[in-house]
Amino acid sequence: MTTTARSARRLSTMVRHSSHLFFGLLWVVAMATHLRRHDGPAATLLGGALLVTYLGGLLVQSRRPDHARRPLLGRLWVLALALLWAAASAVSGAWVWLVFPIFFLVLFIWPSPTCWLLLAGLTLWAGLSPLTRGEGLAVGKLLGPALGAGAAVIAWTIGRQLHRDALAQQQLAEQVLQAQDELLATEKARARAVEREGLARDLHDTLAQGLNSIVMLSRSAAAEHPEAGGQLAVIEQTARENLVQARQLVHRLTREESRDLREALTELVEATARRERAIGSGLEVRLSVSGDEGPVGPEVQQVVVMATRSLLANVVQHAQARTCVVSLAWFDDALALDVVDNGVGLATDHADRFGLSALRSRVETVRGTISVESEPGGGTCVGLHLPLSRPAHGKEL
């Protein structure tokens, strides 16, 4: 957890504990005032019921009930408190000011726009409750609850904005860390690719060419010295076998990059699928690979991985799709990547949305092209076409 997230959690805990303490202090003051006025046993019973209901709701919330039931239990709790408070304030003015902590509970627990209706109702009842007790109306009795409701709304707005800012900063920190990890992984992949390419070139220029020269010299020597033909044939055959092994080794080295790309996409797709299954979104993500896999340079590999990650994020966040297929296809001189979903589609200005403009610029750095096919309600297909340059040492020696 980041420092910002810990600060946000501490702030939320402090606000929650302060509201509980506020309720407790107001309840003690209200009970003392009520007993001093001798407002009757009904007000005493209703005040006691208020305290028991408040503590009971806190106990239920602290035990963390089922996630699906928790919002409903919280709303029922606040509604019960509001009704008990309305009854208590109808028989004793000592309980009127207990509405202030209930304002906060309404704002934080009841969803909009219902919370605004309930807040207005509580404010109105607090101002008019003196009529139910046979008392006259006064400006202070009307203005006090209204000011209290306004202060609660301001405090709630500030707290919600602080929470949003904390979440935004946490997401930004996570994105920075992810970018750093991606940069490190890219540099490692680039270093491995350069090392493999250098090794393959060295094998081609030294060992393989030397073995090829031995084959040619043994043939020439056999023609000039027939009496040594048997021994020279063995030399030629041994050199041929080693030459085949050298060619296979060079071929494996030049193909290693493509295996890294396939493994990277497989890991990325599987991680996305696992995450979606864990949250129960119902999105199915699959990878399809076709064609004769060939060598892929580190720059192209980086673009393919980054594009897949970005496009999958768009599908998860915006597409509302049930299925997404990532297709990777090798051709003689190009590599194609398609990300297809059956979601809601993109609007006509999709080229400048969801990071597609930035992705297009990244693809163009490796001389590639990007195409987007989409219509509202008809899903989306984003395709990348990336040219491949076959290294000379990957061909026949």
Image (spheres, rainbow, N blue to C red):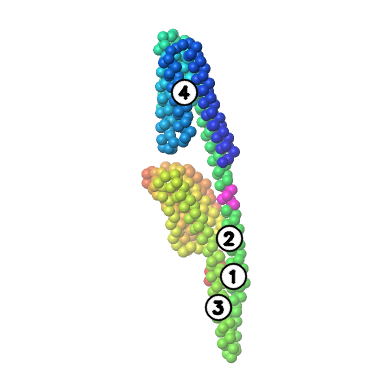
Q: Secondary structure at mark 4?
A: helix
The residue that disc 4 covers is: 51
The residue that disc 2 covers is: 193
Q: Amino acid at mark 1?
A: His
Q: Is residue 350 visible?
A: no
Magenta segment boundaries in residue numbering: 179-184
Q: Amino acid at mark 2?
A: Ala
Is residue 74 covered in magenta? no
* Other residues around mark 3 within 10 Å, as few (<14) / some (14–19) / many (≥20): some
Which mark, by number, is residue 204?
A: 1
**Image-quadrant location for residue 122:** top left
The residue that disc 3 covers is: 240
Tell me if 171 is positioned left or right of 53 in this view: right
Q: Amino acid at mark 3?
A: Arg
Q: CA distance from mark 2 to mark 4?
A: 70 Å
Horizontal and vertical percent for residue 68?
A: 41, 37
Horizontal and vertical percent for residue 333?
A: 49, 62
Tell me if 234 is positioned left or right of 149 in this view: right
Q: Secondary structure at mark 3?
A: helix
Q: Amino acid at mark 4?
A: Leu
Reading the chain from its start, which is encountered first: label 2 or label 3? 2
Residue under the point 46% across and 32% down: 61
Q: CA distance from mark 4 to mark 1?
A: 85 Å
1 or 2: mark nearer the eye: 2
Reading the chain from its start, which is encountered first: label 2 or label 4? 4
Q: Is residue 70 above or below residue 175?
A: above
Horizontal and vertical percent for residue 383?
A: 45, 52
Q: Are marks 4 and 1 in contact (CB under 8 Å)?
A: no
Label total for image: 4
* Other residues around mark 4 within 10 Å, as few (<14) / some (14–19) / many (≥20): some
Residue under the point 61% across and 62% down: 195
